Amino acid sequence: WLPSGYLYEGSKVIGEGGSAVVQSTFSDGRETLSLFQYPAAAGFEAKNVETARSLKKGPAQLIINEDARILQWRQKSGAFALAGRLPVSILETTADSIP
């Protein structure tokens, strides 16, 4: 599930080997939403406001800074983070749709 008007723009791999991160970007032509996929053992470094959130798939953390809202969580297939300026409810719905 993607927010209305958002389309896939592309993906890239950041880093190498066991620490590589895949970044996929989506845009509606004005705003960008990024999905980061980390290895399951990756740690998150939260440097700003953190709020515990609850997704259908389990616990998550919300980080808010001047540039974006970042929702991060773990599941069996890895660790994930969604970053964008969308409302938190939209980030949560998007996160819950990721298999």
Image: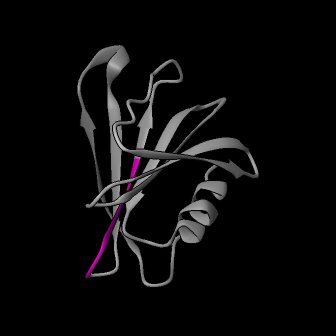
Judge by depth and name the residue closer to the eye, 92 or 76. Answer: 92
User: In the rendered view of the protein, which quadrant contains the N terminus?
Assistant: bottom right
Is 33 contained in the magenta span?
A: yes
In the rendered image, the residue lying farthest to the right is: 56
Q: Is residue 83 left or right of residue 50?
A: left
Residue drawn at the location 66% of the way across and 29% of the way down: 76
Q: Main secondary structure of the magenta part?
A: strand
Give x and y (percent) for residue 50: 49, 44
Give x and y (percent) for residue 72: 51, 43
Q: Is residue 1 visible?
A: no
Give x and y (percent) for residue 66: 27, 60
Q: Can you say whether 48 is above or below 67 in the image?
A: above
Judge by depth and name the residue closer to the eye, 93 or 63. Answer: 63
Is 41 contained in the magenta span?
A: no
Where is residue 93, by image quadrant?
A: bottom right
Residue drawn at the location 34% of the way across and 80% of the way down: 28
Judge by depth and name the residue closer to the eye, 86 or 14. Answer: 86
Q: Is residue 99 visible?
A: yes
Q: Can you say whether 78 is above or below 8 in the image?
A: above
The total of numbered circles placed on residues is 0
Give x and y (percent) for residue 43: 45, 23
Q: Is residue 23 left or right of residue 62?
A: left
Task: Give the residues drawn in magenta, as a range.
Answer: 30-35
Colour scheme in use:
one colour
Q: Can you say whether 28 is above or below 73 in the image?
A: below
Residue drawn at the location 34% of the way across and 19% of the way down: 19
Residue drawn at the location 32% of the way across and 55% of the way down: 65
